[in-house]
Structures are given as C-alpha cells and as structure tokens.
Image (spheres, grey):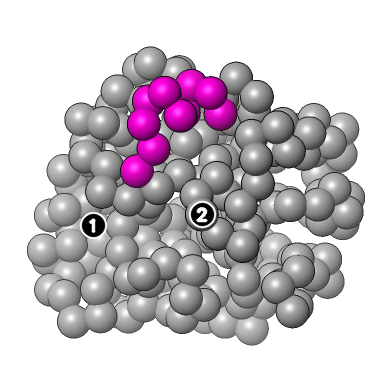
Amino acid sequence: MTDTISSAFSRVKICGIKEESTLQGMAGLAVDYIGFVFAKSRRQVSPERAGQLIAAANGIAMAGRRPPATVGVFVNPTLELLAETLQAAPLDVVQLHGQETPDFCRQVGERFGVEVWRALPVPEQADSAEGAARLSAYAGAVSTVLLDTAGGGTGQTFRWEVIPDYQRAAAASGLRLFIAGGLTPDNAHVLIDTYRPEGVDISSGVETDGVKDNGKISAFVERVKS
C-alpha cells in the first residue's frame, strides 16, 4: 500500500497490538499504522491472531479516515516464513529489524507486493555520518527507515541530536525517516517540535504494566498531531 497520508503532521504507528480492546480504544484517533510483532517478544502474536486483529481494525473508524495500515515486525525472517505469515495476516508493510540486507529487502517488496521498512539501531557512541551512510545503502530497497535505540525494545531514547544527519541522508536517498525508541506521551512534543520527523513509532511508551493503555495512546496521538 502506498502511503497517501498528508505530510503536514508526523505519522503515528502504535506497535505491539494484541487485543481488540486496544483497537476499539483508537476509534476516532488519527492513528496511521498499527503494528504486530511476529518476532520473539512478550508482544508476539501468531499470524492467525494478527489476521483476526486486522479484520477487527478494518471495522473501526479512525477519525473519519480509512483504517490504519498494518505493519508486521520481523527479525531475520526467511522468505518462506513471510509467505506463510502474509497468507494468514494481510499486511500492508513488512518491517525488518535484524541483519537484513538491502538485496533481501528488495526481494521482499518485489515478491510480496508490500511496502518494506528497515529498522536501524543508533549506537550510543557511533558517528552519525557512518550511520547515515548505512541508511543510504537502503535507497531503492525500502520506502522507510526507522531509527531505534540500539537493542530495540529498551524503552530508552537514543541521542536525538543525530537525527538531522539522518534526515538529510534520508531526503537525499528518497527515504522516509521514522523515529522510535523511548517515546512517551510526555516527550513526544519535544521530538516533534525540535525535529519534525515524518513518523513516530511507539509501543512500551503507551503501556501500563505491560498492557496497552488507551488513555496513553490517546494522549500520545493528540500530542503528536497537534
């Protein structure tokens, strides 16, 4: 699916969806993407369960817009695993978080007709110019690069001051740049006001005791979109 959402606001992805009640709580919110984790994680869902949730999401009105696009999160999947998953869960986007090469990402998009995103960790002490060069290697292979804290799922932010270097590299390579890692309703406005990323991806930051919190989701979306 090609993203046609207006670029006036940062796009919002709520990741790690496991329950219909979470989706129901998003009714009326400007959520652009919902994410399902297929990699080993406490948020992992089966392809069959994701298929059920996707069907439920398609019946929920999100701020009078089309249903949110669906994203599947994988770590070093085989093409065979992706084929099996997509048969049960009709995803719009495959998001890759392992050591997937640009060539593999390109194969995924061509074989399955899905949009492909590549998550790249931002090492704590790494030179942002080197990271930006790594990002540029994915030009033409993916539509979007998602910057995350090294290790992923830590609930910690990376050094946001490197974002402009990545933004320039992404723009030069025709890539969209999303930001993840340690986002919360409390720090969203700082990221948006300072760097205006094209998109943001959140999971643990809208949870309470490991469960998605509809109040936090609402607060996060409102602060990003305002």
Could you classify mark 2 by the number of other residues whose Cα lies within 10 Å: few (under 14), some (14-19), or many (20 or more)? few
Q: Is residue 204 magenta?
A: no
User: Along the polypeptide, which appears first: circle 2 or circle 1?
Assistant: 2
Q: Quadrant of residue 54?
A: top right
What residue is shown with label 2?
40
- Using the image, determine if residue 180 lies above or below residue 37: below
Q: Nearer the viewer, residue 222 or 34?
A: 34
Q: Is residue 83 magenta?
A: yes
Q: Nearer the viewer, residue 178 or 72?
A: 72
Left or right: 165 in relation to 80 = left
Q: Position of residue 19 (x, y in %)?
A: 81, 52
Magenta stretch: give its range: 76-85
Q: Nearer the viewer, residue 48 or 150?
A: 48
- Using the image, determine if residue 36 lies above or below residue 125: above
Q: Which numbered circle lies on residue 87?
A: none
Q: Quadrant of the C terminus?
A: bottom right
Left or right: 199 in relation to 87 = left
Total number of numbered labels? 2
Could you classify mark 1 by the number of other residues whose Cα lies within 10 Å: few (under 14), some (14-19), or many (20 or more)? few
Q: Quadrant of the N terminus?
A: top right
Q: Residue at x 50, y 49 (%)?
A: 39
Q: Position of residue 77 (x, y in %)?
A: 39, 37
Q: Residue at x 11, y 63 (%)?
A: 130
What residue is shown with label 1?
168
Q: Residue at x 43, y 79 (%)?
A: 157
